[in-house]
Amino acid sequence: AKNLHVSSSALREAQELFGDVDDMLRVYEDQKLQRVAPGDTDAREGRGSHSVRGPGDSGGLAKDVENKIEPAIMEAHFFTSTDNDIRMLDVPEGVQARGIHQANMMVDAADRARQSEWVYDNLMGLGYLNSDQMCTQVLEDGLHEEDKVLPCKEENYSRRVLVSKKRSNDDIENWRRDGALQSKVKKYVSNVIEHMQDRLLEVPVIATQHKEDCGELLNLREADLPDTTQGGEMFDLYSKKKIFYPEETVQADHRRVRRWDILWKVQSLTVKWLTNYKRTQKRLAAYTEMVQLAESIGNEELIRGLQSCIDTVQQNFSPQDLEDADCKFKLLQVLLEDASSSELQSKGIRRPGKTSQLSYWRKFVPPKLLKSMCISPEQFAENLIYGEKRHDPEPNSFHSPLELIESETSSTQQSGAEQILDTARMMLAVQLAAEPAVKRIVRESFRRNAQVSTKPKKAGSEIRDPFHIYGPVSYLENKELYTFKGAQWLYVDAAEQAGVLEVAIKLPEDVLEDELIKYFTENYVSSDPSQQKEWDYERKIIIKDCVYKHLLPSIEKETRNLLKVEAKEWACQQVRDEFWKTISVSPWQPDFQDGVDKGSVDKYVMSCVWGPGSHKEGGHPTTLAMLDVNGEIIDFMECEGFSGNLSNVKVDRIFYDKRYLKSQQDIRGFIIRNKPQVIALGTGSIECMKLEKILEEIINDILVNDPLQMKGGVDSGDIHVMYASQTIARLWANSSAAVTELADLPQNRRECVALARSFIDPLPIVCSLFSNNHEQEILGLNVHEVQQFLGKDEQVQCFEQCLITVVNQVGVDVNRLIQAPWKAHTLQYVSGLGPRKAAALLDSIKATGRIESRKQIKNFLGQKVFESAASKLIVNRDDVAANADLDELEELLDSTRIPPQWYDVARKISVEIIRCSRENDGGDNSKQKDIDPDEVVEKVLDKPDLVDKLPLSPEFIQKMNINVGDGDSAEGAGEDSKRDRKLSLSELIDICFELRSSCSEVRKHWTRPASNEEFNLVLAEVKDWIKPGRTCNGRVMYTNGLEDGNAQCEPDDSAGGLKRPFFLKGVVVQLDC
């Protein structure tokens, strides 16, 4: 109920009357499990692909409970019957949500080949108006990590080398034309589709455990390139430690999160293709049924038309071709209904309402007229496809169409005959426009040559201002379709929808007449000069009506939609990229001496949020909060003295001015009492600039005058005040997750908690903004101006894709979820899991109390889901060691990101690492056979430098002769889940990297914001107001004086001032925009 944004007071009143709704839901779920057959233990543990008993078997009490709970609450808590089916099925939740597990069985080998080809074409930018797509660029640039053998003096070593130079334009052209290279790319696409559809794997699993099958689909963006070994480091490693890492090689500590752009695109295209495939199969079944009906009445013309629909769909399988075939089928369906209405009605087939006009027309037009006027649409399409006149209209004895009409009808009036002729022309034009081949030719010409022009309407004259949001698109003149970049079309479309812009998309007249009308006419009229000119005149009118009245309007509508889709794809990419900047940065790390593992250091964070005033005035005062190492609240403080307008506060007088003396002393005591390592200062107002100076002044006074009171609390020698964006903290303070956890705290205190936790670990804070199934609070995060053009589902999908990518590369410490419950929101983004399965798993973990190995987690999940999630669920061995005796080797490897099916490989590699170490140290070779595999992993993890000395040569891989199981090779794995294959070099290096730096931080290193970044943080709330063209009145509030720009300023008479202006120090300007 708290997820529905119910106020805390109302919720408490409801609980007093009816009890806790969450408890009722838990009781309801327990009762459902109790109704499962007594011997079905898997069902009670939430394992396997078992089924829940149906509604007919449910007891009256459970039904009564379900009826008493609002459906919205059941849906918000994922307790509907559909949610329960997803939770119980042993298929990754994301796969179920996309429907891949249901569509897979329908696709045969031939269709799979066409699917791979279609996905490849889209990746290469084919079929787009603007081929300059992100994934196409990443493929063409060719930036990637390459694992290969490098020569060394002693022996050859295998290393991971970064190819960081983009291909030139000539290289890109050669790469595209190279058939062998493109065949490899197609093979990689086919491999990934097979993993997604046949093995039901998700992108994170494919990207981390099946690199050999991805190849160039794992290409990197330039922004995602990891660090590499440089010259000085290379010489130091080799001269001091005899470790061989040449320049441009990647070491274990260089690993960085990457976006997997191409794999996500392949998944999106796969889902799109499967959706179209299911629709295609249904349409083919309908087409085949209609063919059989046409055969039963012996109508050869309808049979040929329906067969052409089937051929169109079977040969192309694209959404557009299906639309074209369906358009023709609807016309044929009307013709067939007229021919055999009784048989159609007996089969329950109804005529589409949109084409009923055609049936009405047929009642007045003589069939002989239609046959004499022109060739069939199929014959016309054949003439166009082969570029030669294969079919000609049949000759007839009538001088003109009107003469034929008079002979076939009882109408003797000229106007009646002309009306019948007009109707015949309309019928034939509609039939030609519905022919797929004709549509395809017009579509290709339109997309290649059409031009867009815009001009403001009278009501929208203000957009003529070049600084108006629609200004740049208000005067487009003959702009070609492929030149639209970024979100340009979205602004055009929005301005047109707002009624302030006229938009015209037209083909140039020369193209329209010379390429289309002329070409169509030549293949439609009679080639026999003896034929009467009146008949050809009517045929020319039919062609023009077909193109102008039917094809061009429909193709224009298609093109508008395509422009919008492509622009939205670009907008989604921009939203993902901006959001990525937020979540791909590691948490804040304290400053310690070299040699200290910063990732394992406890963090003591204090946060500060400026407040506009006191509670009495309807606001809230400036608030400080202190959190412990687990992110739980230790202490709060509210300071009204430093709230509101701080422009008049003299920082150097806060120790003497009576107005601020008490507030200064309170903050001073709060800092001394809690001893923070850092103070995160929210940038929700420009007043934070003055607040920063006040806090720094108090800290300096403490460290100078009372250093003993801070002993043991300031290891770095200082307490830094760091700017932090308050946007996400503010969203979290109003989220259902915050209200659920901290219902008794006001908003300003919840903001402080979120701000401090973002320094401890920002990922859970962001993930918790998706906790509400109905209203995701993350939609309040505006990361890019084009976000306004995206729907809610599109925005959520962009954010979730980024979170899944980062969470699965960082990993989730399962025991931390118990120690710090606010971190539990990251669990739903682990591959294989989702909001439903994650919630069930979390309940099981809490009931267990502590996870000591991944084997315990396996008891709570199905086999396939466990295989997907296991390597991302970390069991920290330091946490477990204090509470359990580590007797099993798997528990040590559980503290790494190595998948359980690779544990045997990791043990053998660890044994070789110890052997190589002993050989290098001059150990006795005769004793090397006595190495205990149960001890070596611990030795390697404790001394990770030993991993770098492993040669990783091809001879070493051949000597080891290791197989890697794609499925779980431990006990309990079925034969279908095992796919043993030889160890690849890429997998060997990945295992060594994880042994070398297990669960090391792969996100971008946190750095203190630079001055320009601080400026952007402070102006985060008003940055959209300050842009070129906007007139603002500015008033200097306060400044610390002037300083010259490191150079003498000389008078400049021509400018009436100085050549080099003076710079203001510490200036704060109030703008009225």
Image: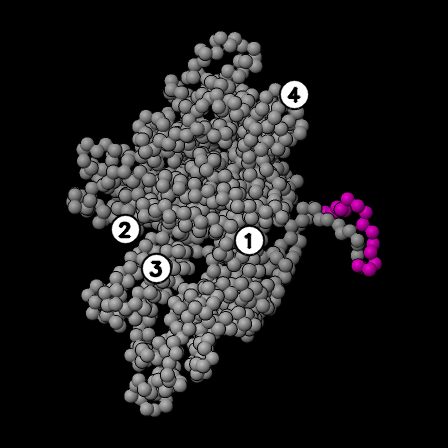
Gap between marks 3 and 1 measured at Cα: 33 Å
Query: Sequence order check: which comes first, mark 4 or mark 1?
Result: 1
> Which residue was labeled with disc 4?
239
**Amino acid at pointer 1:** Asp
Secondary structure beneath dot 3 equals: helix
Instruction: Give the label on residue 132, or none.
Output: 1
Q: Residues within 10 Å of mark 1 (few under 14, many from 20)?
A: some
Q: Residues within 10 Å of mark 3 (few under 14, many from 20)?
A: many
Residue located 35% across and 80% down the image: 369
Q: Is residue 988 left or right of residue 292?
A: right
| Above or below, comparing residue 546 to residue 575 in the picture | below
> Which residue was labeled with disc 2?
71
Query: Sequence order check: which comes first, mark 3 or mark 2?
Result: 2
**Residue 217 visible to the viewer:** no
On the image, the x and y values in percent for residue 857 come to 34, 30
> Which residue was labeled with disc 3?
310
Q: Is residue 192 left or right of residue 296?
A: right
On the image, the x and y values in percent for residue 414 come to 37, 90
On the image, the x and y values in percent for residue 313 come to 37, 58
Query: Sequence order check: which comes first, mark 3 or mark 1?
Result: 1
Are the residues flagged by discs 3 and 1 in contact, CB closer than 8 Å?
Answer: no
Gap between marks 3 and 2 measured at Cα: 44 Å
**Amino acid at pointer 4:** Ser
